[in-house]
Image: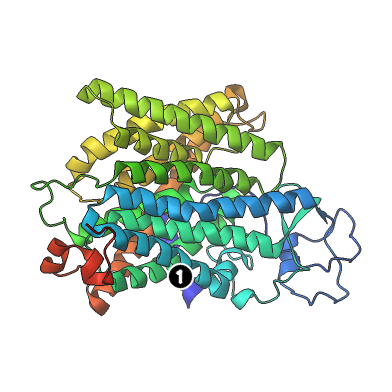
Amino acid sequence: MFKNFLLSLALVAGVGLVAPTFAEDVMAPAAAEAVAADAAPAAAAADTPAAPDAAVPAVAGTVDKGDVAWMIVATLLVVMMVPGLALFYGGLVRAKNMLPVLMQVLVVFSLVVVLWALYGYSLAFGGEGLFIGSFDKLFLSGVNTATLADTFTPESKLPELLFAAFQATFAGLTTALVVGSYAERMKFSAVLIFSVIWFTLAYLPIAHMVWGPGGYLLGKGALDFAGGTVVHINAGIAGLVGAYMLGKRIGYGKESMAPHSLPLMMLGAAMLWVGWFGFNAGSNLEATAGAALAVINTLLATAAAVVSWSLGEGVARGKASMLGAASGAIAGLVSITPACGTVGPIGAIVIGFVAGLICLWAVSQLKKMIGADDSLDVFGVHGVGGIAGALLTGVFSAPGLGGTGDSDFDIAHQLLVQAEGVLITIVWSAIVAFVAYKIADLAVGLRVKEEEEREGLDTTYHGESAYHA
């Protein structure tokens, strides 16, 4: 029933798109003998889990200790993005709402990581369904110290437990990103209900279609190295829908809602930048030159976006702000995410520079045009930046522009594929987000009471205060 429901939604949305090819879940004992080069695909082997001591054939490949060490570090770097995101968001809200933002980011991330182990990993990377995985790996069934996962190199494998852990951090961070759009006015219980539904029905299907074995999007050849569609567009659209459904904050446009701590915001942005190297370079799944390419692209695109946003502010307003520079950094990180493994360094600079200007326009002009109180500009930075990055990936991945595409790379064709992927993600996430917010509203109500919002959610919802006189 669940698969049929997702299939129907996908057909209505005109699904079809793809991303990096790392077919998942290879079951094999550590000491088993490698099979010949024409062995059955890894995904087929994943359908028959085996105990560590079972005498089943292994898929050709070995586990490299350097790859394992790098992926452990990359996973830890992504986890560091949790306090980074919390401080970035927390510094941007008013002092009376600091704790709820910290709390929501931490708890949403933690909740989704648990759900990932229970069923998320199985639905995202188990089986070979077109739009969703299977329940074969429910509760991480069959995933143990002997099972392996594919990387980009056929002969190289990763411990499946490590791959599952790395992907868990992506799921948790993506769902936590949405927090910024409804900050300062949504009930904590509603936040949790929405997060569970949206993670299950939006994040998991998109992740499977883009990255999972047999995913429908895989066959179209769309490029999304580290999550432009899966993470940023997905979260940005969910945030925009939430901003509309919750309505504007009390006093929005009339009272000052300036960030209460730019130093904390800057600290959070810096932590995100560092953690993002794990996010992007870790998506290479190996400690190879591919990871090095992702590192330099993440560095250059982010720096370029800081420069362009600051220049844009200087020209438009006469002054460049600290808030703008930090926001530019996030815009650069977002835009290079889908492209970091397939474009060259100069292409990364162009992508970051363009994204800085586009996202500046989105948060200063587009936000007014659409009339949504997206509290911390999740749509303006992550949604718009993700769309720009996804489309520009289709341009600068061309070998003639320094990218890693094949010699017959067709920019026009790739742009159409990238655009299709963007459209599918927008439609899918918007529908699921609307349903999830509506269910949360019916269950517990979305918005806090007016007096609670005026007093601040630190004390009214958590009984604590971030600051004491």
Dot 1 corresponds to which residue? 111
Residue in view at x 60 percent, y 25 percent:
402
87 versus 459 height, above or below: above
**Outermost residue toward the front?**
469
**Residue in the foreground of this view, choosing between 377 and 107:** 107
The percent coordinates of residue 167 (x first, y second) are 58, 59
Q: What residue type is labelled 1?
A: Leu
Structure colour scheme: rainbow
Position of 25 compared to 336: left or right?
right
Residue 341 to residue 142: above or below: above
Nearer to us in this view, 226 or 184? 184
Picture residue at 41% right of the left edge, 67% below the top: 107
**Residue 230 location in percent, x, y?**
48, 53
Q: Quadrant of residue 45?
A: bottom right
Point out the image quarter for the C terminus: bottom left
**Can residue 161 be seen in the rendering of this structure?**
yes
